[in-house]
Amino acid sequence: MVVDGEEREDCIRERVKKELKYAILSHRWLPGKQEPLYHQMSKEPKEIPDDHEPGWKKLQSFCRTAKDVHDCEFAWSDTCCIDKTSSSELDESIRSMFRWYRNAHVCIALLSETADLAALQLQEKGESGEKAVDTWFERGWTLQELLAPSQIKFYGENWKPLIQGSTNDRGSKVIMEKIETLTDINMKDLKSFTPGIDRVPEKMLWASRRRTTRMEDIAYCLIGIFDISLMITYGEGKRAFFRLMEEIVKRYDRWDLFLW
């Protein structure tokens, strides 16, 4: 059988994904300086400082879950796998993020404000207290982390899976229906999302209910959702979103562009 260059590359990519599969973490960063960072990973031996214990404990639990439950020898977390002191590496990482989540064997999503499935079922938009929506569902970056992976597994605050017996919650009707209610993302997209510049008002509506720490990230976290290329320039403020819309307008010719 003769295959062209593109088919050969696809075959190699799929073989590598099977042999070198990795788990990727989706989570909310802890406040302050509690998360382990890139420069700390190069130090040997690894020592867990007391003042950073919660972040290190989370990383340990993630790596243990990736290996013991999902059979992944490799694990990736945005806290310590990106050198944020390098502008070029940060630029490349942000523009590659959707692809990295999509190519992961599994995305391990930590709902740190949700105890179990019963607690998730109680959550409602606009409520407070025990009915408040987990912050994970309200952050900008977790939108693509929800949609990009082919397999996603949700864990509660104590690293217990919300659903037992399955390694992929995309097939869980009870979880997906609840997420559909909390996010207004339709079931078809929750089960299998294709990025691109289509249904712009609908996708913008998903994003409009989410928040980011940095103003520019409102635009940068949507690069993968719309499958566009955008230069990363922190410090430009609102202009980042204007540039995002400029790129969308170039390829979207429907009149409903701003109906969100």
Image: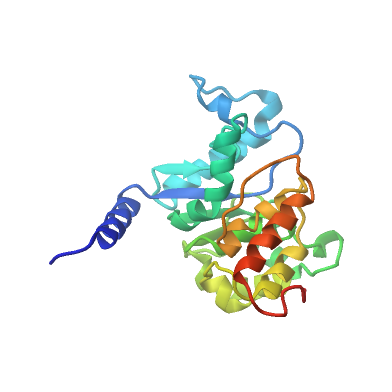
Q: Determine if residue 113 is in view.
A: no
239 shown above or below 171: above
Residue 17 location (% of width, % of height): 35, 53
Classify 119 as above or below 232.
below
Outermost residue toward the top in this view: 44
Res 48 → quadrant: top right
Q: Position of residue 210 (x, y in %)?
A: 75, 60
Residue 91: x %, y % from top left: 58, 41
111 sits left or right of 62 in the view: right
Closer to the camera, 82 or 259?
Answer: 259
**Residue 170 in sight here:** yes
Relative depth, front residue between 168 and 39: 39
Q: In front here: 124 or 89?
A: 89
Total marks drawn?
0
User: How far across and how far down the image is residue 92, in percent?
Assistant: 54, 42
Q: Quadrant of the C terminus?
A: bottom right
Q: To which quarter of the image does residue 83 belong?
A: top right
Name the colouring of the figure.
rainbow
Q: Is residue 78 above or below residue 153?
A: above
Q: Nearer the viewer, residue 229 or 215?
A: 229
Q: Is residue 128 left or right of residue 139?
A: right
* Quadrant, the N terminus: bottom left
Which residue lies most toward the left here?
1
Residue at 65 percent of width and 36 percent of height = 55
**For residue 179, what is the image quadrant?**
bottom right
Question: Farthest residue in the front direction?
Answer: 250
